[in-house]
Amino acid sequence: MDMQVVNNMPSCSMIHVAAPQANCYVCNMINRGFRYKLAPTGEQEEQFRQFAGVCRLVCNLALEQRRDWYRQYEANTDNRLNYVSQARELTALRAEYDWIGAVSQTCQQQALRDLDRACSNFFKGIARYPLPRKKGINDTFRFQGREVEVRKLSSKWSAVRLPKIGWVKFRDTRPLRGVVKNATVVLTPPGWHISFSCEIEHTAPANNNPSVGIDRGIANALALSTGEMIVAPASYARLDRQRRKAQRVLARRKRGSRNYARQRKRIAALAARSGHIRRDFLHRASTHIARRFGVVVLEDLKIVNMTTTAKGTMEEPGRNVRQKAGLNRSILEQGWKMFATLLDYKLTEHGGHLASVNPACTSQTCSACGTTDRQSRESQASFVCQSCGFKSHADTNAAVNILRRWNTPLLPVEVLVGGPAKQEPTAA
């Protein structure tokens, strides 16, 4: 499955739910991404690289101007340095250099818009300062939707017309829906791909399905409060071993040699394959859950804090650094944040709702009596309450606690502030 979240934004911010009418909730518009693999000719691929290179150059020049020359610019012109002023200078730059003018102006303007948005996010405090684009990493360019045209060639192939490039074939793996707002061409290790951002009219039915709590873990990727377990593909570990082995081989290669470049491509291909498998698994799991349940409750996890390094400083070095690094890698491999993002917009599309609760002590609290005791968690999989003797799978017990915290008042003995409370077990 190749459905993508447009602009890395959850769909809840893009879907506007109207007042209920009859048995449904009407959603005005939803944004969806459709990604396909391109099959360009040799000449078209050279044009792709030229477009990506020029857009990268324009973005980097604009970033340098904003970073190093904005004071002189504003003093000499009495104008603020923003997208409008830089787009005006782009017109003069295109007239002076033919090889820049040979590339679509829209693609270069889109690069300036991306930079302007990145700088705005930085000054709002929600993102870091933008970095220069690099060849081999930021090979991408974007057109506006009104400039592209798509036509069907056969049951498996279609073509898209791109300005100054022409018709390019792509593998048609799923029907394109809605109105195309923009089209982004990007180079990945498997090859060139195109992503269409489409605006779709959608009506979500009333969702009366039951609620479920989900505990995200490592051994079991997803544990449902119904007792079901969803395990991640075994290829995660296999590809991780292959990638680490390839990285050790790369360390023995001479930097700048052909063997070094070839080994880097192999590592990138392994990482891309792992990412494709992860996204496919998360898409399938989130779609399955969104169709079955009306409300899904997750823990409000601070994943960035959970995956920080433990190496410490020179004065106070950390402990168990390698073990913590392995745990961080395992957490990131599961894609916890991506799962929540995918589930959010899919639930909204089906008329459901995604909720989050305090994650404190969910794995150490008994779902039967509410007693919180860290000794009840005997192992990764086993939970035996030291107070009432209740036995359950540890992940299932945590999922039940997650669901109960959303729609049920906390039990008197349950502690959520200050960490787990160690209580003396009662006599049988």
Image: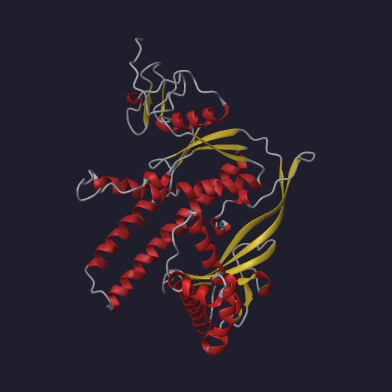
Considering the image in quadrants, where does the C terminus appear? top left
Position of 199 with respect to 104 (left or right) is right
Q: Is residue 77 left or right of residue 371?
A: right
Q: Nearer the viewer, residue 319 or 235?
A: 319
Q: Residue at x 54, y 56 (%)?
A: 8
Q: Is residue 102 visible?
A: no
The residue closer to the viewer here, 132 or 404, is 132
Q: Above or below — where is 252 with respect to 276?
A: below
* Residue 255 position by quadrant: bottom left
Residue 96 placement (x, y as % from top left): 54, 89
Which quarter shows the N terminus?
Answer: bottom right
Task: Return the residue found at the far top.
Answer: 427
Horizontal side, residue 210 vs residue 378: left or right: right
Numbered-mark total? 0
The image shows residue 280 at horizontal and vertical percentages of 50, 54
Q: Quadrant of residue 21?
A: top right
Residue at horizontal 23%, vertical 44%? 320
Residue at the outermost right position: 22
Instruction: Identify which residue, 367 or 128, lies in the foreground.
Output: 128
Residue 199 at what x, y percent from top left?
68, 60
- Point out residue 287 in the picture as x, y percentages from the top left corner: 57, 47
Q: Measuring 21% from the left and 47% from the top, which residue is drawn there? A: 317
Instruction: Identify the residue at horizontal 48%, vertical 18% (top origin).
Output: 412
